[in-house]
Image: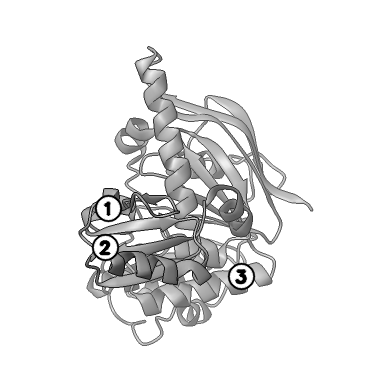
């Protein structure tokens, strides 16, 4: 398929700190490609290099058949992570203003409807809720009906209903042939929207593939979570690996244990084990691996590799400090 976005070995440094270190990717026409990764991994720097707002130090990039700096801007839509339009314009006026920057723009009323802001169209931007403001910003990137759309954390601060409105909009755009590159920390968003996902860590893409392929290759095994204060050592005789849950799953890891590599048919064995040893528990929950497991596993592996390099005397620090200090990336 025709590649709309191509990047080969992109590099970017700020002082002695590496922001991008050989980042390469290719995105086909009509594809939704999601970039995920830890804070400061280089996602915003990569988006800026691909959209021509940051000049890379090495490597090459082409979008829509041209260099990012030379591409026809009428064909490109960009929503930065940080975007602060004039507060004393209404949502309708804001979209009309951006539509006026293009020779052939969409009707702002249609864009208002797309982002679910018809009822708030006459409200000043500064008086919109945070989620409504973000939806207005998404709309501003759509007024020129772009062939290629970059969305940096598009649903940050949006309530669940508004988030689903934006998701459906992105799906409709892709179905109509628009190529979308987005960054996100919401794994459910990436799993729902993305044809392919790339994990960026320390300035390079360490894994790329469909969500299903990444889960299969990197997600690990199914898991049974037992809500209990018991120590994992209490499960020493259980015929399955037992560990504390990852902190990344928004829980106190000391309040549960995770039984790995277990089939649902064997859950009764665990229940019998708990009861036979008088181990108190409040809940059992079984789950297949998902994209969050992939994220945690690959991010942990990258962090271990970085620690090993530092311990070995290699003090190139990766992308974290550079993006936070130089590009303002916080997500």
Q: Nearer the viewer, mark 2 or mark 1?
A: 2
* Mark 2 neighbour density, 10 Å: few (under 14) some (14–19) many (20 or more): few
Work out how far the residue at label 1 is from the one at label 3, CA to CA, in angstroms.
Answer: 52 Å
Rendered position, 301 above or below 221: above
Q: Residue at x 36, y 31 (%)?
A: 322
Q: Residue 284 or 57: which is nearer the viewer?
A: 284
Query: In the displayed structure, does residue 44 sit left or right of residue 34?
Result: left
Which residue ends up furthest to the right in the rendered image? 1
Task: Give whichever of discs 1 and 3 has the lower sequence position.
Answer: 3
Q: Position of residue 115 (x, y in %)?
A: 45, 76
Helix, strand or loop status at disc 1: helix
Q: Are marks 2 and 1 in contact (CB under 8 Å)?
A: yes
Query: In the displayed structure, does residue 155 sit left or right of residue 5?
Result: left
Q: Residue 78 or 131: which is nearer the viewer?
A: 131
Q: Position of residue 146 (x, y in %)?
A: 61, 62
Residue holding disc 1: 234
Residue holding disc 3: 173
Q: Position of residue 106 (x, y in %)?
A: 57, 73
Q: Residue at x 30, y 62 (%)?
A: 86
Q: What is the number of the mark on residue 277?
A: 2
Which residue ends up furthest to the bottom in the rendered image? 119
Q: Nearer the viewer, mark 2 or mark 3?
A: 2
Task: Give whichever of discs 2 and 3 has the lower sequence position.
Answer: 3
Q: Residue at x 58, y 39 (%)?
A: 69
Work out how far the residue at label 2 is from the one at label 3, CA to CA, in angstroms.
Answer: 56 Å
Q: Residue 230 or 115: which is nearer the viewer?
A: 230
Helix, strand or loop status at disc 3: helix
* Mark 1 neighbour density, 10 Å: few (under 14) some (14–19) many (20 or more): few
């Amino acid at each position: 398929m025709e590649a709309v976005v191509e990047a080969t070995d992109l590099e970017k440094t700020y002082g002695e700190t590496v922001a991008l270190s050989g980042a390469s990717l290719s995105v086909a026409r009509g594809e939704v490609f999601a970039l995920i990764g830890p804070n400061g991994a280089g996602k915003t720097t990569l988006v800026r290099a691909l959209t021509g707002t940051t000049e890379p130090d090495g490597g090459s990039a082409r979008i829509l058949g041209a260099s990012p700096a030379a591409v026809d801007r009428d064909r490109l839509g960009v929503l930065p992570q940080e975007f602060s339009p004039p507060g004393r314009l209404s949502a309708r006026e804001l979209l009309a203003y951006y539509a006026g920057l293009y020779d052939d723009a969409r009707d702002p009323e249609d864009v208002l409807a797309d982002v679910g802001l018809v009822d708030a169209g006459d409200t000043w931007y500064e008086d919109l809720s945070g989620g409504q403001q973000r939806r207005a910003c998404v709309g501003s990137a759509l007024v020129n009906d772009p062939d290629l759309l970059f969305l940096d954390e598009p649903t940050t601060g949006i309530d669940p209903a508004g988030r689903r409105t934006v998701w459906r909009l992105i799906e409709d755009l892709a179905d109509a042939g628009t190529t979308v590159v987005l960054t996100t920390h919401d794994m459910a968003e990436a799993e729902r929207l993305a044809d392919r996902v790339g994990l960026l860590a320390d300035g390079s893409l360490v894994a790329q593939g469909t969500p299903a392929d990444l889960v299969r290759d990197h997600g690990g095994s199914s898991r049974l979570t037992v809500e209990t204060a018991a120590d994992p050592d209490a499960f020493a005789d259980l015929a399955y690996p037992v560990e504390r849950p990852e902190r990344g799953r928004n829980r106190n890891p000391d309040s549960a244990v995770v039984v790995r590599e277990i089939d649902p048919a064997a859950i009764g064995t665990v229940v019998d084990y708990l009861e036979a040893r008088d181990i108190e528990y409040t809940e059992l929950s079984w789950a297949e691996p998902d994209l969050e497991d992939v994220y945690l596993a690959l991010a942990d592996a990258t962090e271990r590799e970085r620690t090993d390099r530092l311990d070995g005397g290699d003090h190139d620090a990766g992308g974290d400090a550079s993006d936070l200090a130089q590009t303002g990336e916080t997500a």
